[in-house]
Image (tube, rainbow, N blue to C red):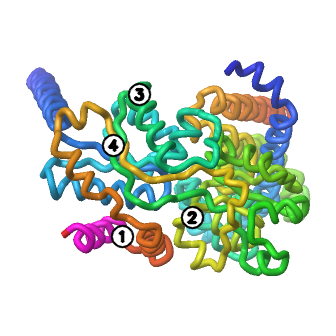
Amino acid sequence: MNLVQFYAEHSGEVLGLIGQHLYLVAISTSVAIAVGLPVGIALTRRPRWRGPVLGLANVVQTIPSLALFGFLIPLPLIGGIGARTAVVALVLYGLLPIVRNTYTGITGVDPAVREAGRGMGMTDRQLLLMVDLPLALGVILAGVRIATVVNVGTATIAAAIGAGGLGVYIFRGVAMVNDALILAGALPAALMALAADGLLGLAERRLAWRPK
Amino acid sequence: MRGGRADGRTGGRWLAVAGTALLLAAACGRRDRVVVGAKNFTESDLLAEIVAQQIERRTHLPVERRLHLGGTFVCHEAITSGRIALYVEYTGTAYTAVLKRPPPPIAGAESVYATVVRDYAQRFGLVWGKPFGFDNTFAITVRRRDAERYGLRRISDLARVAPRWKAGFGYEFLERADGFRGLARAYGLAFAAPPTAMDLGLTYRALADGNVDVIAGNSTDGQIEALDLVALEDDRHYFPPYQAAPVMRAGLLRLHPAIGPALDELAGKISDADMRRLNAEADVRHRDIATLARDWLHAALP
């Protein structure tokens, strides 16, 4: 079956699956940022927690995605079969790059600059918002970029647990030994990953502070 | 320095020699190794294990197991390309899904079997063994309390509640010729939303947890009873008969003629009740399938 013809005949379904895929990635990445950024900042204030927290995030990253989905299914509230479990798993995967890059970005800020800020009478809060975060923004955005691109790929596997998304075509294609169907899911997913990478790369270059 | 490099080169040569030897050994070993495949659900794994152990017992040939390969089409691809030599298939699945024949008129199991035997030999060079005895049809399954509350006994009763219900199926059932689309047409089922697609093994859990309201299981599955579910009667005879039987490459029987009689011993030996009990032992009590297969073989065919 021709791919173009397939898309023409199933345009509604394709758009629906792309929408579900975007939803999975957008929600999970937003939550990962909302949780990961404060955690990363907290780690710079409590360096003792650095080892255990980053270690835990590293361990989560090493769990194969299908296994992680499997582990989550029996859990009350966050588990079950469907999009919710998938979002929880994707948040866990997205946390490590965001936490690590927030921590690395802030600790990488030149101590002399912080001293200067301190000398100008800045409070801790002002120092964070006006010095640390703006200077670390490039590194933090690089972390968000990694998390997003990885989640676009991992979200395809969520179709195994009934979360929908472009993985539906991939799983159907694998079940039917139909390459065109696999491609129908894999191609838009790959394009979505490239687009996310490009857009966030652009944001990174635009927003990151660079010495003039 | 030079010595080190020479050592490195000799090491490389040895590695190449050892590698070639290994490959040759593997290639030689593979000739009389019987590769048995299975589909990606418990019953298929169990039957493959029974077949594998029966071949080992009667012919003493080494048997390699490639269990849980994938769905029907993955196994069909594997056997036609020679990656596996044997797997257990169901007549109705072969008839409608693989051969893509229109559903048979309320047909006897024999005529479906005769057709697949003939067509598989002609089109794929594959040989069907004798059926094991049981029939494993799709079981359109709901929760018992829903069945009682809405008075559901047959699949046609489902049409009344379908507009408010959610269905969940494995990927293969959504695509197959004898799958969801035909079922919905035959019974006039219009669900609230398109069915949720998920891994086949998760459908029972999704039903028991209330994520979906109706699934397509197998009539011989142990979970139906264990999870307090009810299989609805196929009152319009949408599904063809699904007798389980081994499918083999013709070359396998030419190379090892003893395999034929060994598998014939299994003909008619596994009843619906046997299969349901074995599946329940594996899925509900989580017993090892190799042990289950051995125990069953010793009891049924000493």
Q: Position of residue B245 (x, y in %)?
A: 39, 50
**Number of residues whose C-alpha sits closer than 10 Å to that of mark 1, classed few (under 14), some (14–19) or many (20 or more):** few
Chain of the residue where label 4 is placed in the rendered structure: B
The residue that disc 4 covers is B86
Q: Tell me which amino acid carries mark 1.
A: Asp
The residue that disc 2 covers is B219
Q: Are marks 1 and 4 in contact (CB under 8 Å)?
A: no
The residue that disc 3 covers is B124
**Viewer-nearest residue: B55 or A139:** B55
> Cα distance, mark 2 to mark 1?
21 Å
Local SS, label 3: helix
Q: Which residues are the magenta region? A: B289-301
Local SS, label 4: strand
Same-subunit check for callouts 2 and 4: yes
Q: Residue at x 15, y 29 (%)?
A: B24
Q: Position of residue B161 (x, y in %)?
A: 87, 65
Q: Are marks 2 and 1 in contact (CB under 8 Å)?
A: no
User: What label sits on residue B288 in the rendered view?
Assistant: 1
Q: Is residue B154 magenta?
A: no
Chain of the residue where label 3 is placed in the rendered structure: B
**Number of residues whose C-alpha sits closer than 10 Å to that of mark 2, classed few (under 14), some (14–19) or many (20 or more):** many
